[in-house]
Image: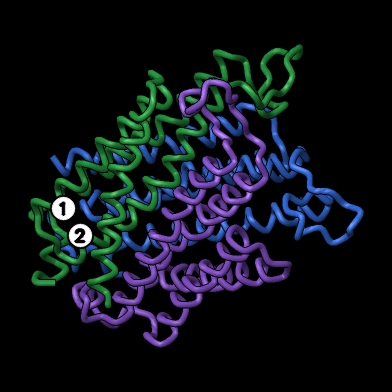
Chain colours: A green, B blue, C purple
């Protein structure tokens, strides 16, 4: 850790700035999934709670394939983007080479946006989703290994 | 970023203190959901794993509506509170106006507690849950946009 | 907060180092769950999306018990490890007694690894999973309460 914390945790540090940028983008992207789920629920009239039924002739339903697809994409975000938020910040703290770090954040950000699009917006044949998934996973694993090595 | 990191990340900073307070409250609230799920599982004898069956005459079950309601509320926490933990901390780092920041953290904290109550403890008619959901979502989106703008 | 932030957030701080170590381990452990789910999906030919079907005679399936077991273990990670990432870092910021803090991080890390093994790798009778779950939960609750008290 060549720099000390108060140099790392300022907006003068371009690595922190890239982390802030992509984290904010991915938080917005994740929260958008909730709205997309809501939209799909209204469009297909698929509601999971009795109190959500607008029309008393409706019944609760859990198995609409469009709703479930968005929910699977959203869950995949929870499994992959949330650990990135944690490890990405710790990676900033170990003062990585800026060019590499910025490109890793960019890779995770772009790959996860593509993942959402090909999974839940315009369904695309494999291996498009698998590729997007593994790019983000690979970058996150790399950061975790670097953090681990720095902590030994 | 008027202040530098070592002024922001101390307990003298009332914005950090508010973030610590509401984050700790919401972590405890989320962990409580696991206990509530467990309670519902015992009360309704609904267990998802063969090794959890206390009585050998029981079978695994997945469709109890009380258990599933708590699990939906818990998943909604994962989707909304966990991104708040990430973006709320980054929002502290961009040195926001204290009064606004403290009220945003308070809004998220109180709204998410109400969300849990009306969803999974004392079920209330809509739009109570929707209102609680959108207050917390709106505050989180606002913070994410501010972080994004600061990082440009 | 006896120390100030730039002393806490350096690798000279053994508490931060322990937090980095166990967070990195647990990120890798969580990401491994995705691969384990994928492995189980291929082994049992259980795919949730039409575009994932390699053989056109297959149909989407959602109810394979081996796949669902890994998914339940993974969801339990989301519910417990992700809040730990947030509160563990805030606990570092309140400058806890190093010996205690390091052992709490170790307890969470080891307990959650055991939780995964007995839940999804080599299924073990209860109360092995319950014990692992409550050790990690107890340590996380303790940290959250300490953060809460420091913020008052």
Chain letter belonging to callout 1: A
Q: Quadrant of residue C88?
A: bottom left
Q: Residues within 10 Å of mark 1 (few under 14, many from 20)?
A: many
* Residue A106 visible: yes
Cβ–Cβ under 8 Å for marks 1 and 2? yes
- Which of disc 2 and disc 1 is earlier in sequence? 2
Residue nearer the viewer, A83 or C9: A83
Residue nearer the viewer, B85 or C80: C80
Residue highlighted by disc 1:
A101
Going 23% across and 55% down the picture, which residue do you hit?
Answer: B93
Chain letter belonging to callout 2: A
Q: Quadrant of residue A127?
A: top left
Which quadrant is the N terminus of chain C positioned in? Answer: bottom left
Q: Which residue is at the far bottom?
A: C99
| Residue A36 % position (x, y) | 46, 24
Residue highlighted by disc 2:
A92
In the image, B143: left or right of A13? right
* Spatial CA span between label 1 and label 2: 8 Å
Both on one chain, marks 1 and 2? Answer: yes
């Amino acid at each position: 850790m060549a720099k000390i914390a108060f140099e790392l945790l300022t907006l003068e540090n371009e690595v922190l700035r890239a982390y802030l940028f992509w984290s904010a983008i991915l938080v917005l992207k994740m929260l958008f999934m909730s709205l997309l789920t809501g939209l799909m629920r209204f469009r297909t009239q698929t509601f999971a709670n009795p109190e959500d039924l607008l029309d008393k002739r409706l019944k609760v339903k859990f198995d609409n394939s469009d709703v479930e697809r968005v929910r699977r994409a959203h869950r995949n975000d929870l499994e992959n983007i949330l650990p990135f938020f944690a490890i990405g910040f710790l990676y900033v703290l170990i003062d990585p080479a800026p060019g590499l770090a910025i490109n890793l954040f960019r890779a995770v950000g772009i790959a996860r946006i593509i993942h959402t699009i090909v999974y839940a917006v315009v369904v695309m044949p494999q291996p498009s989703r698998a590729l997007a998934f593994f790019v983000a996973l690979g970058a996150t694993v790399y950061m975790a290994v670097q953090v681990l090595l720095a902590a030994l």
